[in-house]
Amino acid sequence: MALQVQELRLEQLFSEAFLLRIPDFQREYVWETEQAMQLLDDIAEACTRGRSTYFLGSLVLVGSEESGATWDVIDGQQRITTLMLLLASLRDLEDDDQFRESLDYRLNDPGDPVVGRKASPRLVLRELDREFVRTYVQEGSVEELFALSYEDTSTHAQRRMIENTRAFYDYLDATYDSAERRQIARYLLREVAVVMVGSSDYADAYRMFHVLNDRGIPLGPSDILKARVVSSINADLQAEYAQKWDAITETHGPDFEEFLRNIFIVEQGEPLAGDLIDDFPEKLLAAYEPDRNDEFIEHVLLPYSAIYERIRRPDSRNEKPEVWEELNLLSQYNSREWHAAAMWILRNLDENPQRQAELLRDLERVIGLDALAHTAHSQRVGRIVQIIRDLKDGTPPTQIFGVSDELRRKAVSNLRGAFATNSPLAKIVLQRANAQAEGLASLPTRRALNAVRVIPSKDPSLKWAGLSPSQQNYWYDRLANIVLTSARPANLRSSSDYSTRRKKILGVGDAYVLTSQLQDLPEWTDDVLNERQTAIVRSICDYWSIRQDSEGIDLTAVEEDRLLLGSRASARGGRQVKNIDLLRVGLIHEGDVFVWERPRLGNSYRVTITAEGRFALEDGTIETSASAAARSVSGTSQSGLKVWRREADGKSLGELNESYLQRA
């Protein structure tokens, strides 16, 4: 059969013309939050720039006349699934009913009984994830998705969908107002396009898949740039410089194009606005063409290549100790935006290694805080560009690497929160906490260093001594429960009690101070974990100098559910709202009942406001904050200001806080 090739806007793809289906033999959803947020950043940036069309690549489908509008997705399922999560987040943030219904229509086909079309989600996932996504994303509310615990999911794909949807929802909610989100939604549907390659034959579809993914287009950007640069060099020298270019390409492998992008940022003081093969020649090569391209290779490409390799693979044998130490710390992060700033520092301050180390340390602090705060990719790149501009201008480091109160608060809030099981960030921040506790700039590097959990599971049947099931669930993913050790995780799997796990963790002889403390802790109780959590968070905040905001407030002493609100409160006089304030002005009263409904899980919780503004649970427990009350009843970390609503009028605590601030 001849292939069907068609350009489609997403409003066409997410319509009654297509019922997309992920075959069960396809791999699971694997996109991480970094990839998902990159997609959103790119689309939002294209929307802001007013680009008429944003191409999202190809989509290989298999269908037939017999299957009608039903198409199996052979290539493109990661992007299509991520777009579905983005549309669901935009829908559930929408407060205009008509606009919300329009977005819901892109996720769910209401059916048409006249033509015999049944109601169905527009994207049908693999059987393992199908009902989960239909219930909590397509037909449900993503806010219910966020309330799920680890035990409520059955696949890694489902957990990634929760993480990515939460990232979309939180970022869209915090960054854009309603009108801006609608603009993004319109752009997404009207201007974002894919090239659909359709076939009725699986063999044809897979051949097309491999053509599109295995260099079916013979020349990549680096090949095109090489041809342009080398062809302008004297004919007698072309072979020599072609070999030099190839050697650099071989050295950096798949990172070569990223290397070129970093050179562009360093030299131009701006990120690439378009494609590499468009902007790089027009803005950077133009200074060397038509007859100085050999100088570009000798004085730009080759020196930066050597520096880039030092950054990618820090080697203590070839660096000053203080510089190697900072490069080693930076290399621990998954994000790589910092490479461009490090390239400038290493090239322009080569005669002053102490100065290099100081600036790299300042850079590491900013990169660490952005990682903790889940700062969007485009914002991180923008920060690096500004850092390079300021370095070139000779701006004082205190101004170059300054940190806003908002970033401090987000970082502290996330330090208190849960860390995903496989997240490298827990290991990174614990290394800094241990270094601070030991009075060191960094910990000695060890080949085998693992971040392991003392409580080994959230499974309530474990019955961990000294902790209730809800406490066990709460502490499992928090820093207080994670220790650094060279003990192999596999050697700990058979040990489920504290005494045995502690013995194995300590038995390898590690000298990490926060790990060694287990020796003096015969029990792993809620009180011990609370005290340990506070100490660890404060150590990290002291390491990065973010413990106090610009007004001198100790952020580690601010209640969890007030922390992010505090940045808004500061703008209105520096006060944080407490329940006693709400009682005083009559916004709440003693005896008011607040409820938290979780209909999908069949749970309903109630708390009563005391005369002191505290929260009395149904079992008689008294909690001092809304989030602590939510944690106590559910065993999960929640924003208490959002989940608790007054029974009498449905107002959330967050809304009542805002009312108080507006009065103030």
Image: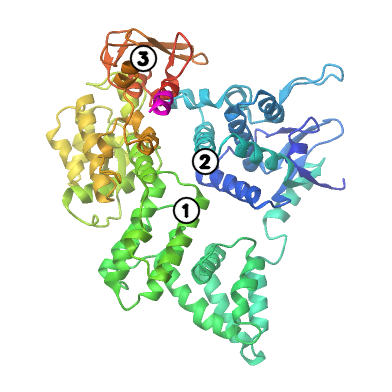
Residue at label 3? 586
Mark with earlier residue (1, 2): 2
Residue at label 2? 175
Q: Could you tell whether 54 is left or right of 415 in the image?
A: right
Q: Can residue 94 be seen in this view?
A: yes
Which span of residues is magenta-colored? 657-664
- On the image, the x and y values in percent for residue 36 come to 56, 43
Residue 559 versus residue 632 in the image, above or below: below
Corner quadrant of residue 330: bottom left
Residue at label 1? 380
Q: Residue at x 78, y 44 (%)?
A: 8
Secondary structure under the numbered disc 2 in the rendered image: helix
- On the image, the x and y values in percent for residue 61 come to 75, 41
Q: Which of 331 and 567 is in front in this view?
A: 567
Mark with earlier residue (2, 3): 2
Quadrant in which the C terminus is drawn: top left
**The disc labelled 3 sits on which kind of residue?**
Gly
Secondary structure under the numbered disc 3 in the rendered image: loop
**The disc labelled 1 sits on which kind of residue?**
Arg
Q: Dot 2: within a 10 Å radius of its alpha carbon, few (fewer than 14), some, or many (20 or more) residues? A: few
Q: Dot 3: within a 10 Å radius of its alpha carbon, few (fewer than 14), some, or many (20 or more) residues? A: few
- On the image, the x and y values in percent for residue 18 come to 78, 33
